[in-house]
């Protein structure tokens, strides 16, 4: 290392730079100067080369030997440290700019009230960094930042990881600010049964569910989709509570309810992580099956299929009413099982509701 560091048009001078000048001007050898100072020649050499910080002990000895003050030497060390920190911060900012290219600032501005500062990229970076409560946007590149992807595959791009982590950080921060007791699985099972009665309560279900889940120590966070995140939902233990985050990326009510119960299935199995896209593994399959069983009782669904040859609006509505579910959920299941064609937009428009998350 050197006793000074150059970065662009700035120079940071280590205390060793000045000590070296004093030694040379004294006419003494380094060994003699070190003995008078009360340290070893090796320690003095390391200090002059800028390889270690100036200690209070050496600052005190220098002040007594040279008739200066301890504060004088400590200010030199502090000025050096602050300038080096500035250099490092500028280098980190360069790396952050590359990560920021993967994020959509408009998302944070429109949904979370970050300021409208067009073309001021570095200020936008600062705003997002502080909003997410991270030291640098570069940490968003870590696939294991807060909670691991349950099915990490080669299909997961850097953009997916960065944007998914940003959503999870938002959800974690909101969870930390939510007052709720510690997670209680038995109470949560009761609140889940209650949630099943709310599938057709399209206007008011969310605050109702949030309150019921909060009482069981589960904080439900529904977020607008962040482009390129590719995630459906995520769960994580946070300060004794459980964060349950659902993305509204597909907008349809039936996919929302399926995603919600898929994530609930993970919680019931004690499996915390991020659900990405359509990737499957054993835990994802189990969560899918849990969601299917909860939303539509399997025996009743099979009987429904056997007893009907056509599945028109009336047939679907009647069955949905018999199991107290939103008809869109039944239609979504029929489409998934290829009983009804996905391209039947007329039936879809009549039975499937759309949800759009508005952050208040």
Image (cartoon, rainbow, N blue to C red):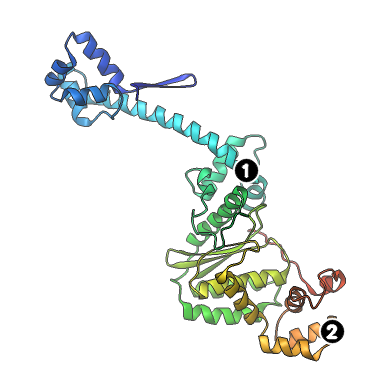
x and y, in percent, of residue 217 in the image: 48, 71
| Residue 353 in sight in this render | yes
Look at the picture and state if 325 lies above or below 357. Answer: below
Total number of numbered discs in the rendering: 2
Residue 160 at x, y = what percent? 61, 52
**Closer to the camera, 283 or 169?**
283
Give residue 314's mark: 2
Res 248 → quadrant: bottom right
Q: Residue at x 33, y 21 (%)?
A: 3
- Name the foreground residue: 201 vs 32: 32
Judge from the rendering whether residue 300 lies leftward or rightward of residue 78; answer left or right: right
Residue shown at 51% from the left, 76% from the top: 268
Q: CA distance from mark 2 to mark 1?
A: 49 Å
Identify the residue at image location x=36%, y=26%: 80
Is 136 left or right of 13, judged from the image as shown? Answer: right
Quadrant position of residue 303: bottom right
């Amino acid at each position: 290392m050197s006793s000074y560091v150059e970065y662009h048009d700035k120079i940071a001078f280590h205390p060793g730079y000045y000590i070296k000048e004093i030694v040379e001007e004294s006419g003494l050898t380094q060994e003699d100067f070190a003995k008078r100072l009360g340290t070893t020649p090796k320690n003095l050499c390391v200090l002059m080369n800028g390889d270690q910080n100036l200690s209070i002990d050496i600052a005190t000895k220098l002040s007594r030997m040279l008739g200066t003050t301890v504060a004088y030497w400590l200010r030199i060390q502090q000025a050096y440290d602050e300038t080096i920190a500035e250099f490092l911060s500028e280098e980190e900012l360069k790396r952050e700019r590359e990560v920021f290219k993967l994020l959509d600032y408009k998302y944070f501005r429109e949904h979370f009230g970050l300021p409208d500062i067009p073309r001021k990229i570095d200020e936008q970076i600062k705003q997002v960094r502080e909003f997410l409560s991270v030291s640098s946007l570069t940490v968003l590149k870590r696939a294991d930042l807060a909670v691991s992807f349950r099915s990490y595959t080669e299909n997961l791009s850097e953009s997916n990881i960065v944007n998914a982590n940003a959503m999870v950080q938002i959800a974690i921060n909101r969870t930390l600010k939510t007052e709720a007791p510690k997670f209680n699985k038995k109470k949560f099972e009761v609140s889940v049964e209650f949630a099943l009665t709310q599938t057709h309560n399209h206007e008011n279900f969310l605050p109702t569910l949030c309150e019921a889940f909060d009482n069981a120590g589960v904080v439900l966070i529904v977020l607008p989709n962040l482009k390129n995140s590719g995630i459906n939902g995520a769960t994580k233990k946070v300060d004794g509570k459980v964060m349950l985050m659902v993305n509204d990326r597909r907008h349809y009510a039936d996919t929302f309810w399926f995603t919600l119960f898929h994530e609930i299935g993970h919680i019931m199995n004690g499996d915390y992580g991020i659900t990405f896209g359509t990737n499957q593994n054993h835990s994802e399959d189990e969560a899918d099956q849990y969601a299917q069983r909860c939303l539509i009782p399997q025996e009743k669904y099979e009987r429904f299929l056997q007893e009907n040859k056509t599945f028109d609006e009336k047939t679907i509505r009647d069955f949905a009413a018999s199991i107290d579910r939103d008809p869109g959920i039944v239609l979504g299941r029929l489409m998934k099982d290829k009983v009804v064609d996905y391209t039947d937009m007329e039936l879809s428009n009549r039975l499937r509701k759309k949800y759009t998350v508005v952050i208040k």
